[in-house]
Amino acid sequence: MNRRENLKLLFTGSLGAGLMMTGCEPEEQAVTGQIFEGGTPGGRIAEEKERDAKLLADSFFTDEERKKLDTLVDIIMPADSESPAATELKVTDFMDFMMLDQPGYQTPMRGGLMWLDFEADEKFGKPFNELSKDQVIEIVELVAWPDKADPAYEGGVRWFNLLRNLTCTGYFTTEAGWKYMGYKGNTPNVWDGIPQQVLDKHGLSNPEKYTAFYLKPEDRGKVVEWDDDGNIIG
């Protein structure tokens, strides 16, 4: 199983547990944005919309930093036969917004991006953005596998975990990301009674009087109506 498939399964499991792929580390739990009073659950009040518009009009990353991120997010989530690369889904733009929305991410993220240049200079005598693909992979391999990483790179491992989490969150909250996972959402089901093989196993049968009320594909958009006594109206 390749790295991309592992990430797909990891994120699918996180959805089932109701988890976000960022804010999982203890030290990240304190990262919060601005809190507003009022509004409705799941809705956006005027102050929130105004704040979002302001953040979207701003930018955190420099052009040099964005180039580094574009390289890295496409290593984490490259294009394949089923879905596009992370840069095609503007994952770096998502990260830029997150840096402004959650300022607690700014220092560790910028520190990690600076470390890339330090490591590139130490190993190859040039900035990270001037490295070849093989040289980039050599640096990524130092921090991409927590269980295998040298303890000397503990800080780099923690940073790359943050980067990977943000990449996956940005990727799998797009339409293409949902499609890649096969996520259907609240898709109406069709019920035509208990399967016959199950009924036969237990010596039972579907009551004929309820056959007319089973949900059929052509009726899935209709809302069931009930009378005052709690009976379904035909």
Image: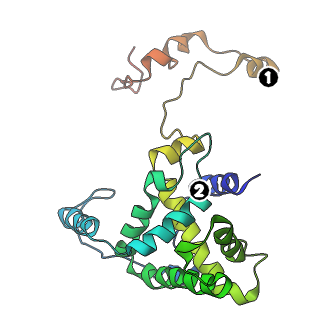
From the image, which quarter does the C terminus lie in? top left
Amino acid under label 2?
Met
- Residue 57 in sight: yes
Q: Is residue 179 above or below residue 55?
A: above
Residue at 61% of width from left, 52% of height from top? 12
Amino acid under label 1?
His
- Residue 19 in sight: no
Q: Nearer the viewer, residue 168 or 76?
A: 76
Q: Is residue 147 left or right of residue 21?
A: right
Cα distance, mark 1 to mark 2?
49 Å
Query: Mark 2: few, some, or many residues within 10 Å (few <14, many ≥20)?
Result: many
Q: Is residue 199 left or right of residue 15?
A: right
Residue at 81% of width from left, 21% of height from top? 201
Q: Secondary structure at mark 1?
A: helix
Q: Quadrant of residue 6?
A: bottom right
Q: Earlier in the sequence, mark 1 or mark 2?
A: 2
Discs 1, 2 touching: Cβ within 8 Å: no
- Percent from the top left, x then y, of residue 38? 23, 67
Q: Nearer the viewer, residue 141 or 155?
A: 141
Visual colour scheme: rainbow
Q: Nearer the viewer, mark 1 or mark 2?
A: 2
Q: Nearer the viewer, residue 98 or 111?
A: 111
- Percent from the top left, x then y, of residue 193? 61, 20
Q: Quadrant of residue 102?
A: bottom left
- Residue linked to disc 2: 77
Q: Is residue 20 above or below residue 172?
A: below
Q: What number is the disc on residue 129?
A: none
- Residue linked to disc 1: 202
Q: Nearer the viewer, residue 207 or 73?
A: 73
Residue at 43% of width from left, 67% of height from top? 95
Residue at 53% of width from left, 28% of height from top? 189
- Percent from the top left, x then y, of residue 55? 27, 69
